[in-house]
Amino acid sequence: MSAYVRKLKKGTFWYYKFKYKGTVYFSECIYESKSEAKRAEAIKYEEVSNKKKNTLEPVLSLKDAIIERLDYVQAKKSIDYYKDNKRYYSMLLKSLGNTPIDIITRKDINDFIFKQAKEAKEKGRDNYAVNYMLNLYKALFNYAIESHELNMRNPCLGIKPFAVKKKLKYIPSDEEIEAVRKLCDPAQRLLIDFVSETAARINEPLKVTGNDIFDTYVVLYTKKSKNSNVVPRKVPKPDCIKDIKLEPDERLFKLWSDTPKFLERKIQTLGQHCWNWHNLRHRRASIWHTVEKRPLYEVMCLLGHSQLSTTQKYLQMLG
């Protein structure tokens, strides 16, 4: 608390000014002495603090915090991410009950996460899902604290991720890819070839039109979440479409508007090691870097990554 001086024509006068829980309070009048201003300030401070202490503020429950966070995720993020949040938040709510979030402790979260890790180990699973769960809970409490300006510490802070066994992404061989292609119709083979040659995310080729195809390159548009910005990037024009001519607004792949399911079914029919569209993306990234000797930064740009560390996780030696 502080008293301040103000010089006026009639003499020097004093006033007080202090801040309590984000609100600034000024004296309503000026005083002839510093001691008088400080006494008035002390009285006002006690009045304000007692009023705040005796005011019952509504407490945010865990269920309400989850509902608010899910509404945000549904509007801003992908459908899959929303489903993951909903699933793991339900597990936490079932375990802790609909308790006020400001009384949830780090031990509460740690005990719950430890239980999940123990169950995963008993089932022979790694801790990827457990660590993912911890990240979602941390985001939940951060969102509630920031949205409601709560004076509390995130109970997930200080909880360390569980150890995981790093695994190389499986890279299908040329023989495996060709075996799948033989079971496909022409449109399906074209989609496999396009993804294999461009390292496209599977949602990107489905949007390609004649406007996006040029003599030496194709423009792919990336949208990583529901409401994120659409970002274009150039990739070398694949050989599989060199003889295809499209009208400006004509789509290259007209049969699908969402992720095709045929690839998984055909891989299962052949009894191959499980792989998917994203494995083809890893395969092309590795070819660009290890076979074609493209610089790491160029591969990063071709993949549409924003960090080299992400690109490095894609690369491996091809057998």
Image: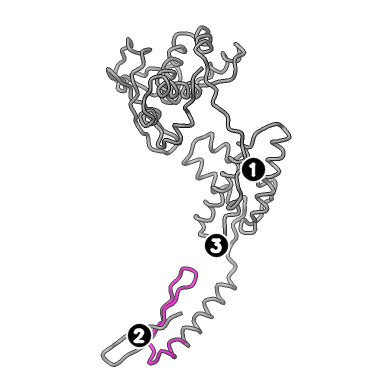
Which of the 4 image quarters holds residue 237?
A: top left
- What is the spatial separation of the Cα atoms under label 2 and label 1, in whole angstroms? 58 Å
Dot label at residue 90: 1
The extreme top residue here reads 182
Residue drawn at x 48%, y 39% is 77
Within-10-Å neighbours for mark 3: few <14, some 14–19, many 20+:
few
Residue drawn at x 39%, y 89% is 31
Residue 33 counted in the magenta span = yes
Q: In screen coordinates, is 161 left or right of 1?
A: right
- What is the spatial separation of the Cα atoms under label 3 and label 1, in whole angstroms? 25 Å
Mark in the foreground, 3 or 1: 3
| Residue type for callout 1 | Ser
| Residue type for callout 2 | Val
Going from the N terminus, do you reach mark 3 or mark 1 first?
1
Dot label at residue 151: 3
- Secondary structure beneath dot 3 equals loop
Q: Is there CB contact under 8 Å for labels 2 and 1?
A: no
Q: Which residues are magenta?
A: 15-38
| Residue toward you, 272 or 61 | 272
Q: In screen coordinates, is 80 left or right of 227?
A: right
Going from the N terminus, do you reach mark 2 or mark 1 first?
2
Within-10-Å neighbours for mark 1: few <14, some 14–19, many 20+:
some
The residue indicated by pointer 2 is 5
Q: Where does residue 223 sit, x and y in percent of width and height?
A: 41, 33
Q: Is there CB contact under 8 Å for labels 3 and 1?
A: no
- Secondary structure beneath dot 1 equals helix
